[in-house]
Image: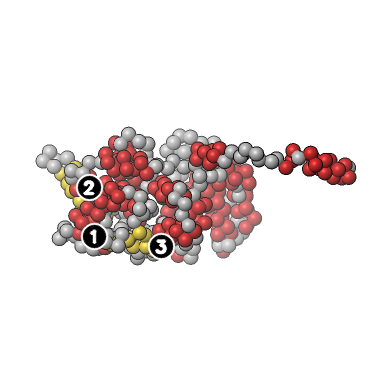
């Protein structure tokens, strides 16, 4: 059975609850839908009214043997923990629904809880793949700019370097959101897809004059187009049209912007590959900018400004989410502080060792 009609109706009500009562966005709801579908697969689409905690135990065992459809490898601990959490939330909601109170108890939902060990592994911080400023500058230098599509692609990467904007925002900025003279970008949540729908200002970060020149030229090119206005997308989608042979090819830029973030990632992937570098996603530029800031010896006020530029209300968010020192740099910093000559090791002082021996003897 591919679908259980009764289950689909229940899930529809739950997704409406997530959107309207909990304020969840589409991405969160999609993640919940995928997790619940995994559980249904394990029960062969049995009705939720036939729920039993043994189904949960079998489901958890099955997750350990489930492969990732994209990579072919076993599901990561992060995916497993997230899947169980979504299922626990769903059955907690289901337990208070009148039609299921007799079949699902609140305590049953607790069986979806992942082990403490798996949660710890899932939350462990690992080194991220983060580019250096030199690598991004190399990518910009190697990108062609003969066509308007190529200039848009180059300007997109330059703009991301200057602002550290999230991928959703990159796909939804408008021409009027940018003030070149002030070096300022407005994240207007009324149309910009900012995280948590926050409205804030970002100023171009002083990291690359070449990137600033590239983007300024692009903004001027769009602004001088009489067919476009301040409400036009900052990075329009590619216009696809048939050529003389009837094949569909890129034919300039469309009037509208991208409907999703996939094209943004594709541009980054092509640019880094063409430059002979591994792919770094747009979000990694935020890590890169924070790591760069940590090498500048900024004052607390300056670091707070840098943090606000990324849309963070708390500077601790900047440090904890993006400020992790890479392992190789951690080693360099530790090795740089060798024990100075003439350093006196207190524990090797004869008088101190004699005192420690007396204390230990009295303790016995």
Tell which of 194 and 241 is nearer to you. Answer: 194
Disc 1 is placed on an element classified as loop
Give the image location of residue 277, x and y in percent.
35, 36
On the image, numbered disc 1 is attached to which residue? 232
What is the quadrant of residue 29 in the picture?
bottom left
Distance from Cα at disc 3 to Cα at disc 2 = 29 Å
Give the image location of residue 175, x and y in percent.
26, 60
What is the quadrant of residue 131 in the picture?
top left
Residue 1 vs residue 142: left or right?
right
Residue 154 vs residue 342: left or right?
left
Q: Are marks 2 and 1 in contact (CB under 8 Å)?
A: no
Mark 2 or 1, nearer chain start: 2
Mark 1 or 3, nearer chain start: 3
Q: How many C-alpha atoms fall within 10 Å of the one at disc 3: few (<14), some, or many (≥20)?
A: few
Residue 93 appearing in the image: yes
Residue 185, compared with residue 244, is above or below; it is: below
Distance from Cα at disc 2 to Cα at disc 1 = 17 Å
Spot the residue most to the front.
Answer: 342
Labelled disc at residue 151: 2
Spot the residue most to the left.
Answer: 244
How is the model colour-coded? secondary structure
On the image, numbered disc 3 is attached to which residue? 197
Nearer the observer, disc 3 or disc 2? Answer: 2
Mark 3 or 2, nearer chain start: 2
Distance from Cα at disc 1 to Cα at disc 3 = 20 Å
């Amino acid at each position: 059975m591919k679908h259980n009609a009764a289950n689909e109706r229940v899930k529809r009500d739950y997704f409406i609850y997530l959107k309207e009562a909990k304020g969840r966005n589409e991405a969160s709801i999609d993640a919940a839908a995928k997790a619940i579908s995994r559980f249904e697969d394990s029960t062969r689409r049995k009705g939720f009214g036939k729920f039993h905690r043994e189904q949960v135990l079998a489901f958890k065992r099955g997750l350990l043997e489930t492969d990732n459809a994209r990579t072919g490898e076993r599901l990561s601990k992060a995916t497993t923990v997230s899947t169980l959490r979504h299922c626990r939330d769903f059955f907690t909601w289901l337990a208070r629904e009148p039609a299921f109170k007799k079949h699902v108890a609140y305590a049953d939902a607790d069986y979806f809880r992942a082990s403490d060990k798996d949660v710890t592994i899932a939350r462990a911080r690992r080194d991220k793949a983060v580019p250096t400023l030199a690598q991004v500058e190399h990518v910009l230098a190697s990108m062609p700019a003969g066509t308007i599509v190529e200039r848009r692609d180059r300007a997109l990467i330059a703009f991301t370097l200057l602002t550290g904007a999230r991928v959703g925002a990159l796909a939804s900025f408008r021409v009027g959101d940018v003030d070149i003279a002030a070096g300022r970008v407005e994240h207007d949540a009324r149309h910009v897809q900012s995280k948590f729908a926050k409205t804030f200002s970002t100023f171009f970060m002083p990291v690359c004059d070449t990137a600033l020149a590239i983007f300024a030229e692009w903004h001027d090119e769009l602004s001088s187009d009489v067919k476009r206005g301040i409400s036009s997308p900052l990075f329009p989608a590619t216009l696809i049209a048939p050529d003389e042979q009837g094949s569909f090819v890129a034919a300039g830029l469309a009037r509208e912007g991208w409907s999703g973030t996939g094209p943004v990632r594709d541009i980054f992937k092509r640019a880094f590959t063409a430059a002979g570098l591994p792919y770094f996603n747009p979000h990694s530029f935020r890590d890169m900018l924070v790591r760069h800031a940590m090498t500048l010896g900024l004052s607390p006020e300056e670091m707070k400004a840098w943090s606000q530029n990324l849309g963070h209300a708390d500077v601790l968010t900047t440090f904890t989410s993006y400020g992790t020192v890479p392992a190789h740099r951690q080693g360099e910093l530790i090795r740089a502080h060798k024990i100075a000559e003439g350093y006196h090791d207190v524990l090797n002082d004869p008088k101190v060792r004699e005192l420690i021996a007396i204390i230990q003897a009295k303790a016995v």
